[in-house]
Image (cartoon, rainbow, N blue to C red):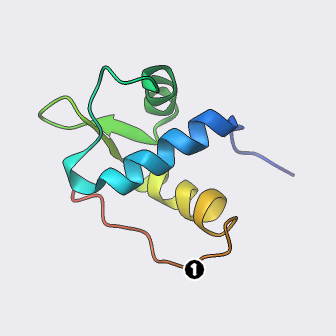
Amino acid sequence: MWNEPYLETCCRSALHRVYLAGPGGRPCGVKDDACLERLERMGFVSRNGQGRFVATDAGLARHTREVLLHEGTLAPPRSSGS
């Protein structure tokens, strides 16, 4: 049984962009802010000391399961630096 919250395609893409941004984080005020805020409410991203969105451990795990493995890559998750 599926027991995780569903991520819309746009939110999966936003999570991937946060992943690509790495420890420096993704800035606020970009077109995917609505998705980043939704991901924050779900616990997949948080804001660092500069107010930028960074992936949480839960976000990195979800990214690995749903984005990286879905694309057929087996790259290990990045460290969130926190």
Rendered residue at 40%/40% (across/down) = 45
Q: Quadrant of residue 7?
A: top right
Residue at the image position 37 percent from the left and 56 percent from the top:
20
Q: Is residue 71 left or right of residue 58?
A: right
Q: Name the residue at 65% across, 70% down.
A: 69
Left or right placement of residue 28 versus residue 60 in this view: left
Q: Residues within 10 Å of mark 1 (few under 14, many from 20)?
A: few
Q: In the picture, which quadrant includes the C terminus?
A: bottom left
For label 1, the SS is loop
* Image coords of residue 38 (percent x, y): 51, 25
Q: Where is 69 relative to 60, above or below?
A: below
Comparing 21 with 53, the one in front is: 21
Q: Is residue 6 visible?
A: yes
Give x and y (percent) for residue 80: 29, 58
Residue 40 appears left or right of 62:
left
Q: Is residue 56 visible?
A: no
Name the residue carrying label 1. Answer: 74
User: From this viewpoint, which residue is outermost toward the left?
Assistant: 49
Residue 68: image location, x then y, percent: 59, 66
In the depicted view, which residue is nearer to us: 44 or 32?
A: 32
Q: Amino acid at mark 1?
A: Leu
- Residue 11 spot, x, y in % from top left: 58, 36
Quadrant hosting residue 25? top left
Look at 43% across and 47% down and name the residue there. 17
